[in-house]
Image: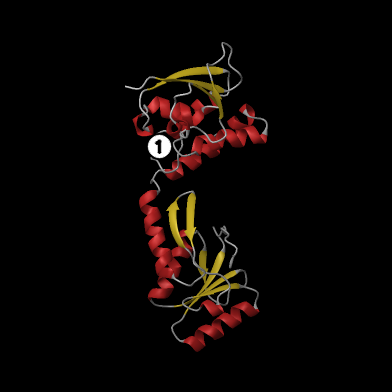
Amino acid sequence: MHSLPIFVRLAGRPVILIGTGPMAEAKARLIVRAGAAIVDESHDGAALGFVALSDPAEAAAAAARLKGRGLLVNVVDRLDLSDFTMPAIVDRDPVLVAVGTGGTSAGLAAALRQRLEDVLPTGLGRVAQALHRARDRFKARFPDFSDRRRAIGGLVAPGGPLDPLRDIADPDARIADAAAAADPRIEHVTVRSADPDDLTVRAARLLGLADRLYHQAGIPDAILARARSDAERIAGPAPALAPPGLSLALVWEPQ
């Protein structure tokens, strides 16, 4: 790994920017979006500096001055002079996805960012905020960290109630359903097709939440694969008294 990816909180903090023109303006927009204050080279409180100068000698001299003061420096188009590089960013506040190539190909990073823009729903940030609001509720419902991690993992698993690649209209309601599912509960689901895309919304939602599956031998593997990876699979009928958590009794009745 050529670099350590980190996210730096810059809100209200000074950041030095040296340069003018389009390159400097692009860096200035990013700095402002991060909530930082752009200051000139004379400022003493900055920890980061950006150099956007077209003249190679001037850029090298400016970088040397800032580094001599202990700043970490990014020099536009000069990987050899830079302490850090800027990634291509997908912003789904508060979710940030950064794609970096270590400065070797900004074009590739930009292409990957565009593909991710097309894949990640615009409402992904709402899901993150809802999970943050539910932290205390989940700690109370799942005191054990491993149980809590599995519960949240089930929520955000592929096909789960909070699948991050789907647009979720009301993530708070989905989380409330998941928390309630920790009480002993058995739900019955009839499966009529081997294609997971034919599952009803209710069935897909329950599969994403279930702690265990009781199923007949004929249930297709593609259906079972839509459940949480850590959900227990049990061939046979569900018991009369449910264990803790959500159990699904799957009945196979193909059309």
The local secondary structure at tag 1 comes to: loop
User: Residue 231 in the image: x percent, y percent?
Assistant: 56, 30
Q: Front-most of 238 and 221?
A: 221
Q: Position of residue 109 (x, y in %)?
A: 43, 64
Q: Is residue 241 visible?
A: yes
The single residue placed furthest to the front in the displayed view is: 217
The coloring applied to the image is secondary structure
Residue placed furthest toward the bottom:
57
Residue at 61% x, 20% y is 244
The kind of residue on which mark 1 rests is Ile
Which residue does the numbered mark 1 point to in the structure image? 168
| Residue furthest out toward the top | 240
Nearest the eye: 23 or 186: 186
Residue 238 drawn at (x, y percent): 54, 16
Q: Is residue 118 left or right of residue 236?
A: left
- Residue 113 against residue 183 in the figure, above or below: below
